[in-house]
Image: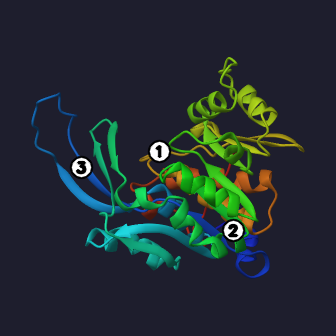
Amino acid sequence: MSHLARSALISPASTSTSAHGSVVVVGSINVDQLIRVQRHPKPGETLIGTSMEYLPGGKGANQAVAAARLGASVRMVGAVGRDLQADVATAILTDVGVDQSAVRTVGEPTGLALVSVDDDGENTIVVIPGANALMGAQAVQSNAGIIAAASVVVLQGEIPAEGIAQAARLATGRGVLNLAPVIELDAATIRRADPLVVNEHEAALVLAQLEPHRAVPTEDAKLVSRLLGSGVASVVLTRGAKGAICADRDGTNIVASPTVVAVDSAGAGDAFVGALSAQLAAGVSLPQAVRLAVRVGAFAVQSRGTQTSYPTLADVLPTVNA
């Protein structure tokens, strides 16, 4: 392990748990039912699959695991069902030490994502929210003290909009809003994000919500500029293999991604958000946090799976060639 790679990964995160505070993730907890097929069936057609497995998932849980693996003190606010799937969904959260005392057990089944992947790597996904659909304003409000005490509160688009809005109002620390999938939110909630984390397609959809009567640009830099101009405090635009753009009132930074051989991109965006949140909780600047998050995302795509592909403090991260 090179000194550069180790110090870039460990130094900021290692101070976060004691010196700077915690990360609270308010979001989804799922089981991913992963089916592999040679090709996807046509309507009305039945095919024989090649394998099936159940894995922990959900964007909220993924991001909590990613942050915890990098040394952050993480608490999860969410819901699971009274079923065996709940144990699968929370297994890695438990393994990495995420505090689940604010995870409710409810009457609805644990959230389920039905994922089908063919031999070309193309996937189809159907998400059944289940217990996640009960994370509305009242459920979030019951955890008001936990959310208000967090240094960083992380939100996504897989719980009801009113739950996201309530969590954003309760947060007194920094709010990271990864609006994926993009759902309808009131403008005030989006503008509380610091940062708003979206990819190119999501950025366009969010901007259309904030400025419904204006044309939406297609260039990445212009999307970022317009989102800032619409009142969002800071923006991180993820660009896959091209890295990311981050911007706030202090300026705009283009961050390159390491060149790696991608095996499975599933969950890489969540690895990025988890790493970013851990760094921000450690008091790191937004551009510096994005530089590490890009490397963590690149690490994650090099192996299959979501939560199991995320790095720990002992792992060597890929670096950007000079």
- On the image, which quarter does residue 254 sit in? top right
The residue drawn where x is 43% and y is 67% is 79
Instruction: Give the amino acid at mark 3.
Output: Ile
Q: Is residue 8 visible?
A: no
Q: Secondary structure at mark 1?
A: loop
**The C terminus - image quarter:** top right
Q: Estimate the spatial distance between the alpha carbons at disc 1 and disc 2, rounded to whole Å.
A: 22 Å
Left or right of 80 in this view: 16? right
Nearer to the camera, 169 or 322: 169
Q: Residues within 10 Å of mark 1 (few under 14, many from 20)?
A: some
Do labels 3 and 2 touch, CB within 8 Å? Answer: no
Left or right of 42 in this view: 272? right
Q: Is residue 278 visible?
A: yes
Q: Secondary structure at mark 3?
A: strand
Query: Where is mark 1, residue-wise?
Result: 262
Tell me if residue 56 comes above or below residue 231 in the rendering. below
3 or 1: tag closer to the N-terminus: 3
**The N terminus - image quarter:** bottom right
Q: Residues within 10 Å of mark 2 (few under 14, many from 20)?
A: some
Q: Secondary structure at mark 2?
A: helix
Left or right of 232 in this view: 177? left
Q: Position of residue 293 (x, y in %)?
A: 65, 54
* Between marks 3 and 2 in the image, the one whose residue lies nearer the viewer: 3
- On the image, which quarter does residue 168 sit in? bottom right
Instruction: Give the amino acid at mark 1.
Output: Ala
3 or 2: tag closer to the N-terminus: 2
Query: Where is mark 2, residue-wise?
Result: 6
- On the image, which quarter does residue 66 sit in? bottom right
Left or right of 15 in this view: 106? left
The residue drawn where x is 51% and y is 66% is 139
Q: Position of residue 270 (x, y in %)?
A: 54, 54
